[in-house]
Amino acid sequence: MSRTIIESVDRHSPAQRAGVEAGETLLKVNGHPIVDVLDYKFYTYDPELTLELSRGGDTRTLTLRKEEGEDLGLNFQTYLMDKARSCANNCLFCFVDQLPKGMRESLYFKDDDARLSFLMGNYITLTNLSDREAQRICDLHISPINISVHATDPELRSLLLGHKQGGRGLEMMKKFARGGITMNCQIVSCPGLNDGSQLQKSMEDLAALYPAVNSVSIVPVGLTRHREGLYPLKPYEKESAAQVVDMVEAYGRKCLETHGTTLFWCSDEFYLRAGRAIPEDDYYEDYTQLENGVGMMRLLRTEFDSALGLADEVEEVRSYSTACGVDIAPWIGEIVDRAASKCHTKGVVYPIENHFFGTTITVSGLITGGDLIAQLKDKPLGERLLIPVNMLRHGEDVFLDDVTLADVERELGVKVIPVNQDGFDLCDAIFEV
């Protein structure tokens, strides 16, 4: 069945006004075949369109006018108008391979889809990208895209990705650079594999592609306790993490002098493991790599301080507690102390150890409902418990272990309030009376 069959047409949309009907198949726009969502979004941007449609073997064309960039109002079977492309790699550090058995099926799907990179910000490795698809990215100027680089040395990258095509990644990135495609990159750093001299080489190779390479994050490998039969990796310790931070900062200073941007940043997790202070706000420039945990803690503090400066002093707010990952707990504790100066109510911060995935996992976003219940049972929680919203499945009230928000509230006997990763939202949640 064609995935460009129109399932529904939005009321009062340009498509409805033009007479497009549900059940028709969208074949072409302005003479261009429509294969998937990239073609659809690119070729329907213009204000004047000719659509070629079919139903039951009959084909018709119609024209319409709309505002430039305005959505046509057509809905298809799937957002991509195609199946999501799965990952063809066997990465030595893949987090999905480290999940315990028995979780919901969707968590085990590994996507590696260039369309989702452009549309949703997902990271791709390029190993399943055909020459035709790579050329289409250049032709349609699909930009920016996010690329998991890990290493630029062909042999090492193939080893890390567990795929013989891994070694062609840098050459494909050079093609994108020539095509004017902007790339944001990440390197998952594994001790003894792609750090040290290999990390230095990767940074130099990527910096040579500036400005097409717009930013690069370096994050430490995440290792769960479910690694039976997998490659023997080890986590970063204080000294080894500090070596990575020093190397990245030193090369970042060189890039700042040469290109006017630091270009390479370590994630907050690297600073915490190294026992180093989180850099100041201006170090992170535009916070381009925020989704990879680069500067997330600093931005939270900066936003919170701004919000606190605008807040009126109050006598008392409802008692509260907050739960978060072990790494960020001291940072949240300082924020809670700051808030107490204006609301005269001191919240309690509970660092939650990750027993579900293993105690080497210390970030908030991977804390499960079961761990919250087990570690906060019978603890003084006040009238409400604040948690980061990224503990929950996106857009839902479900934790990674399928425990629901309602389950946690029932077991702990407290109202649980998910808070966005935003200092203003956190300030509002604390000052709620």
Image: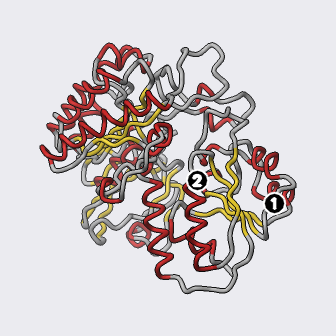
Q: Residue 330 carries which label?
A: 2
The correct choice, above or below, for 364 with respect to 231 in the image is: below
Name the residue carrying label 1: 409
On the picture, is 250 further left or further right than 34?
A: left
Q: Give the secondary structure at mark 1.
A: helix
Q: Which amino acid does label 2 sit on?
A: Pro
Q: Residues within 10 Å of mark 1 (few under 14, many from 20)?
A: some
Residue 297 vs residue 130, the one in the foreground:
297
- Quadrant position of residue 217: top left
- Quadrant position of residue 124: top left
Seen at 68% across and 70% down, the residue is 346
Seen at 29% across and 21% down, the residue is 197
**Are circles 1 and 2 on residues that touch, CB within 8 Å?**
no
Q: How many marks?
A: 2
Q: Give the secondary structure at mark 2.
A: helix
Q: Please tell me whether mark 1 or mark 2 is closer to you in this view.
A: 2
Residue 230 vs residue 50, the one in the foreground:
230
Instruction: Give the alpha-carbon distance from disc 1 to disc 2, as whole Å.
Output: 25 Å
The correct choice, above or below, for 41 with respect to 428 in the image is: above
Counting from the top left corner in percent of width and height, residue 60 is at: 36, 55
Seen at 45% across and 45% down, the residue is 268
Seen at 37% across and 36% down, the residue is 245
Earlier residue among tags 1 and 2: 2
